[in-house]
Amino acid sequence: MKKHITALLLALAASLMPAWAAPFPERPVKMLVGFAAGGITDITARQVAENMSRSLGQPVVVENRAGAGGNIATSELARAQPDGYTIMLASPGQLVVNPLTQKSPGFDPKTQFSLVSLANESPFVLVVPANSKFKSVAEMVAWGKGNEGGLSFASPGLGTTMHIAGEMLQVMAGVKAVHVPYRGGAQATGDLVAGRVDFMIDSVGAVAPQIQAGQLKVLAVASGRKLPQFPEAPLLSSMYPGLEVSSWLGVVGPPGMPESVQRTLVRAVEQAVREPAYVQMLEKRGSVVAPAGPAAFATHLTKERERVERTVVKAGLRLD
């Protein structure tokens, strides 16, 4: 009789334990994506999720929550249980730009997320139409200063990294340019190729097909290091110190995730981004695997926020 009572008490205690006290994971993990299916964030998320599934021994299922520049998905993650079963592949807009340019994004990126690991980093380039009259950034800036309101730049939308990059150039170069936001990257690139706008600062992967086809030309590299595929292109930071722009994606979880769960997810992401197929996919887009782990992610975010905040304050940029 005593054995039966003991067994009953143990079973009851186990049922009252929090879900994350059990070995993680015991069921599928949901990965939120704040943008529509088919975009670069979604494509990356599905590859990372597939690779993580093999490491975790459970499916990692991508769920798209598009809208509000990624805020819908980010707000959902902030409210999720911190058990590791809801994570998100986050973009710079969600964790850096939106909180700095919107009064009420619906979350605090500094306190409401558990950092897991960066998944990749994509260098940016400044491109112009192949038949552009500008042969260098200095020439373009000089023309813009002499023709106020005549210079224009494209982006896939308000608050995107490409938009912020254009604002950074204006602030640091002391030139005015009209921002022309589009509903997506394809439309922005298409109008740039057609010469309807003067320039765009975008990731190598996004504009590589047009560069290779001779429709766009690279005037400068916006990331912090020279790119072997464009050896003659100067760094923007050599002309305007501090002007460095890159895109990145990283895995985050809700606030307060137990360390054991976080460690398991960190290992899964680290293994996922080292798989050859994933690395090859990045290389084709001109991207690279970023430093792994929450510490490197935190350092990266701090630098990104400081750099973007300087631009936002100087430009008086609000996206509400």
Image: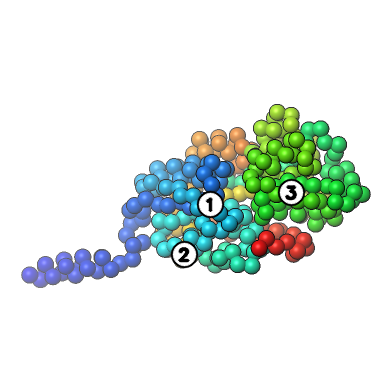
Image position, residue 161 (x, y; %): 67, 51
Residue underneath mark 1? 66
Residue underneath mark 3? 180
Q: Residues within 10 Å of mark 2 (few under 14, many from 20)?
A: some
Q: Quadrant of the C terminus?
A: bottom right
Mark sitting earlier along the chain (3/2): 2
Going 70% across and 37% down the picture, which residue do you hit? 190
Q: Residues within 10 Å of mark 3 (few under 14, many from 20)?
A: some
Image position, residue 44 (x, y; %): 53, 43
Going 62% across and 55% down the picture, which residue do you hit? 93
Q: Secondary structure at mark 3?
A: strand
Scheme of image coloration:
rainbow
Q: Residues within 10 Å of mark 1 (few under 14, many from 20)?
A: some
Numbered disc in front, either 1 or 2: 1
Going 49% across and 49% down the picture, which residue do you hit? 64
Please state which amino acid type lies under the numbered disc 3: Val
- Residue at the top extreme of this rendering: 213
Q: Quadrant of the N terminus?
A: bottom left
The disc placed on residue 79 is 2
Image position, residue 202 (x, y; %): 69, 44
Mark sitting earlier along the chain (3/1): 1
Q: Are marks 1 and 2 in contact (CB under 8 Å)?
A: no
Numbered disc in front, either 3 or 2: 3
